[in-house]
Image: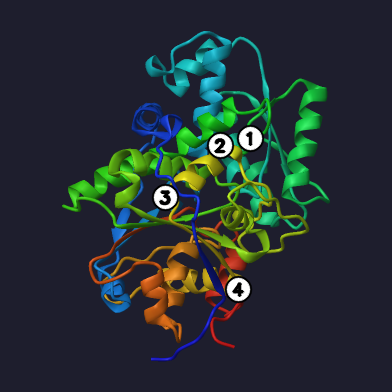
Amino acid sequence: MSAFSLKMDIADNRFYTGEPSPLFSRQPAQQARRFHQKIAGYQPTPLYALNELAALFGVNKILVKDESQRFGLNAFKMLGGSYAIAQLLCEKYQLNINELSLDDLKSRIKEKMTFATTTDGNHGRGVAWAAQQLGQNAVVYMPKGSAQERVDAILRLGAECIVTDMNYDDTVRFTMQTAQKNGWEVVQDTAWDGYTKIPTWIMQGYATLADEAVEQMSAMGIARPTHVFLQGGVGALAGGVLGYLVDVYGAGNLHSVIVEPELADCLYRSGLKGQMVNVGGDMATIMAGLACGEPNPLGWEVLRNCASQFISCQDAVSALGMRVLGNPLGHDPRVISGESGAVGLGVLAAVHYHPQRDALMNKLQLDSQSVVLIISTEGDTDVKHYREIVWEGKHPAAQ
């Protein structure tokens, strides 16, 4: 077997307490899922068992939740945007979300609202989709360097889409200022002082996928995963999903690993310090969905208390994950996973091929009994770039 060494810095969380979060627990997640279940076309996304890959990598199970199949939107993000917008409208019109579907809501709305957001692509697409379903307006701002395909996907949903000349975090600030001037509602999955309600709803919406995964594992006869690998951008997905899993299984029964690109590793750096640390600059990683330099305080609290480890890795780790998932072993199912979707599996693959494989397996507490849950958060949302990596060999594993 060939061996190659990809950069992965692994930090143990020295500030771990195991304390669960009531905001991101089973009850709010199941409320969000009941709302999603009423949307036309809802079905749980597949949870695939990659048994032959697990045998190769020396673990018991590798389970991949394939969010490319979420409502035809090729990513999980609409779970957050749709739920938050629905909650916002329910609050405005004094309605009970447990009694309503999207169609019911649409019939109750008396005036047009405009929802504004910042996105690398997937979240904005989710907000645009929810606004379109409800007959509302959406204005979506994207950071510089955003792929045209991701812009076009938002425009096709009837939203306005503007690519700025700023990085993600500065674009968020610009969106906030513009929305305040125009009287728009901001639907953002990061939080700051005075802005926590909507990101809380978004994170609770994301947990629908975790509720599905727990149900699916149970149907497979799996009592619980031993490990979960979660992508860290601002930490909204990671916090929402980990909060739910900790409530279900207990923090002490779950080895949770938060994975980020080295150019935007704000959670990794925060994990080293035990407090939020921001990263600036262009953050020019292929993992566009994770190119965020400022942690979401709501997500960070869950991760600080309950994450086992943080990993900062180079882009080639994600590229490796994309190739492995797209070219399965034996009878394993194929998963089309984008740059931000594949990094968790990429870490497992990079460990397998590393010259210090045994030491890294030990560091991550992986062995032949391990059941590893991975969320592939997106499909090929930038088809051209996906093919450059998977077909043409961009960001090779071995130089």
Mark number, residue 298: 2
Mark 3 highlights which residue?
69
Helix, strand or loop under label 4: helix
User: Taking 230 as reference, is 194 left or right?
Assistant: right
The residue carrying mark 4 is 388
Front tag of 1 and 3: 1
Question: Which comes sooner in the sequence, label 1 or label 2?
Answer: 1
Given contact means CB atoms under 8 Å apart, are the residues at marks 1 and 2 in contact?
yes
Residue 356, percent across and down?
A: 44, 83
Which marked residue is nearer to the observer: mark 4 or mark 2? 2
Earlier along the polypeptide chain: callout 4 or callout 2?
A: 2
Q: Where is residue 43 shown, x and y percent of the image?
A: 34, 40
Of pointers 1 and 3, the one earlier in the residue sequence: 3
First in sequence, mark 2 or 3: give its number: 3
As measured in the structure, the alpha-carbon distance from the residue carrying label 1 to the one carrying label 2 is 7 Å
For marks 2 and 3, give the CA distance: 27 Å
User: As drawn, is 260 to the left or to the right of 375?
Assistant: right
Q: In the picture, which quadrant includes the C terminus?
A: bottom right
Query: What distance separates the C-alpha of mark 3 from that of mark 4?
Result: 22 Å
The three-letter amino acid code for the residue at tag 4 is Glu
